[in-house]
Image (spheres, coloured by chain):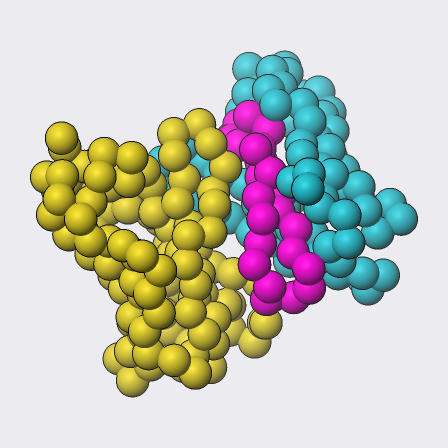
Chain colours: A cyan, B yellow
Amino acid sequence: GAGVSQSPSNKVTEKGKDVELRCDPISGHTALYWYRQSLGQGLEFLIYFQGNSAPDKSGLPSDRFSAERTGGSVSTLTIQRTQQEDSAVYLCASSLGPIDTQYFGPGTRLTVL
Amino acid sequence: GENVEQHPSTLSVQEGDSAVIKCTYSDSASNYFPWYKQELGKRPQLIIDIRSNVGEKKDQRIAVTLNKTAKHFSLHITETQPEDSAVYFCAAPRIGSNYKLTFGKGTLLTVNP
């Protein structure tokens, strides 16, 4: 079946602009995660959605970052007033439930000039 | 747990040799330990995982061992092939969470033909 998809694959923006990154999880997966991967680094947890529960936003680095998940499926990560340090690959993952195998999307490479 | 240490950061082996990557974690309650492989420019993909009720798990040339007393787990790749070249990440649950994973910083494995 279809895997996790993300769009856009690449995004170049100017400092101060807002960006929206989209994630389509695997159908039927109730858990959805966003991670950030900086060059040569591991994966930094950002936010977690599970079903209709309130999301765990504890990994968001600042209040410029927000995310929502509509209808328990598609999720959007929004970064307001982007800064150069926001440049990274943003990865989305979904799993059937908590602590099940996480399947990653291809990521969105964000470059803030 | 909160801290996952991964070693080595880079590993170079000759084709056919074995490769071992080790991770340590801090939370003795952790019970799920996945390993992901990320090829250049690609998404991370799960290659093997282990839960705390077993000490070892094998899948063809790949094995993972878990030492709960010492709080470390290792990835073993035997008969390495050039296509094994990638960055490998270990992960463990964060303290008090059954869904948030902390990832190691990764090991760049190069298999020389």
Q: Is residue A29 above or below residue B96?
A: above
Q: Is residue B6 above or below residue A79?
A: below
Q: Position of residue A23 (x, y in %)?
A: 71, 37
Can you give x and y, in whole percent of width and height, for residue A80 in the image? 72, 31
Above or below, A87 against B95 in this view is above
Q: Position of residue A15 (x, y in %)?
A: 62, 19
Left or right? Give the position of B100 relative to A28: left
Q: Quadrant of residue B75?
A: bottom left
Q: Which residues are magenta?
A: A85-109
The answer to whether any part of residue A88 appears in the image is: yes
Q: In the image shown, does B109 or A90 lie closer to the viewer? A: B109
Residue A65 seen in render: no
**Farthest-out residue, right:** A71
Q: Is residue B12 above or below residue B58?
A: above
Identify which residue, B85 or A58, lies in the foreground: B85
In the picture, measured across the screen, residue B111 lies left or right of residue B63, that is left
A107 in magenta: yes
Q: Quadrant of the C terminus of chain A?
A: top right
Quadrant placement of the N terminus of chain A: top right
The image quadrant that residue B58 belongs to is bottom left
Residue drawn at x 47%, y 51% is: B46
| Residue B112 inside the magenta-drawn segment | no
Q: Report x, y in % for residue B17.
A: 11, 47
- The image quadrant that residue B72 belongs to is bottom left
Name the foreground residue: A78 vs A101.
A101
Question: Could you tell whether A46 is left or right of B88 in the image?
Answer: right
Residue placed at 68% from the left, 60% from the top?
A: A96
Which residue lies at the image location 57% right of the left edge and 44% below the top edge? A104
